[in-house]
Image (tube, helix red, strand yellow):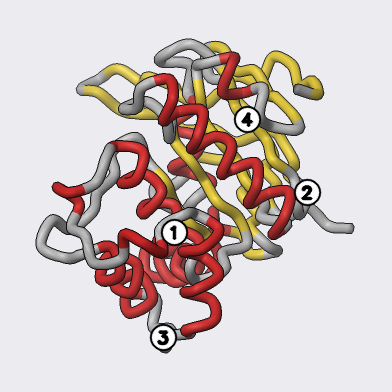
Amino acid sequence: MEPILETDNLWKIYHIGKVDSPALRGVSLQIMPGEFVAIMGPSGCGKSTLLHVLGGLAQATRGSVLLDGNDLSNMQDAERTQIRRCKVGFVFQRFNLLPTLDVRGNIRLAQHIYGNEFDPHRFEMTTNVLGLSHRLHHRPSELSGGEQQRVAIARAIINEPKILLADEPTGNLDTANSDAVLALLRQLHRDLGQTIMMITHNPEAAAYAGRVIHMRDGLIVDGIPA
């Protein structure tokens, strides 16, 4: 089986005036289809930069990124955008929901942006799994933080991405809602076979994953089962 995501000697260097500031210093990793991997490390260690590069949101300075066999490092912005639309779902710390749309509208908007026609079976399955069926006509302001993050997850997986990239998905949630969101991610992995890479600094969140990779100073320092 081939990795769904693979990097080799990945570097990302930011140029600040005359100073070069490396955020990634030669990261090599593999994520297999169906894995739930947590990337752990302190603030500033390069976790979020790694996620942005792996998801095609940022260009690597050097090294390679293979996403489902596509080399992102050799692509222009428009090409990376197309691959991102077809292959990747994103969940961020901020929910990024449109306040004027209800739950149904926010999820369907993702299908429209990706150019997919409305699939009622996929929509019903997704909203049922995430416990949103009774909240479809509520706007974000009428939802709890945990419910808003569930809508964000539904929006991310509605187009059946090859991999879900989650950047501190519980960072704005209290303990109860954090546990509920993490349990849902584990359920998506277990029941739907969704491949997930989650960025976190919280060891309790990382424990929901099947494998934990630790980063420090832009490098991977070890990888262990959760």
Q: Residue at x 89, y 58 (%)?
A: 1
Image coordinates of residue 210 in percent, x first then y, are 75, 33
**Identity of the amino acid at label 2?**
Met
Image coordinates of residue 87 in percent, x first then y, are 55, 65
Point out the residue furthest to the right here. 1
Q: Disc 3 versus disc 4: distance between alpha carbons?
A: 32 Å
Say the numbered circle drawn on residue 118.
3
Badge 4: few (under 14), some or many (20 or more) residues near its Cα, within 10 Å?
many
Per the image, the residue denoted by label 2 is: 32
Callout in the foreground (4, 2)? 4
**Identity of the amino acid at label 4?**
Ala
Per the image, the residue denoted by label 4 is: 38
Which of the two labelled residues, at mark 4 and mark 2, occupies the earlier sequence position?
A: 2
Point out the residue furthest to the left here. 100
Q: Are marks 4 and 2 in contact (CB under 8 Å)?
A: no
Q: Is residue 128 left or right of residue 67?
A: left
Say the numbered circle drawn on residue 120.
none
Per the image, the residue denoted by label 1 is: 154
Image coordinates of residue 33 in percent, x first then y, are 76, 54
Question: For residue 4, what is the image quadrant?
Answer: bottom right
Answer above or below: position of 149 versus 80.
Answer: above
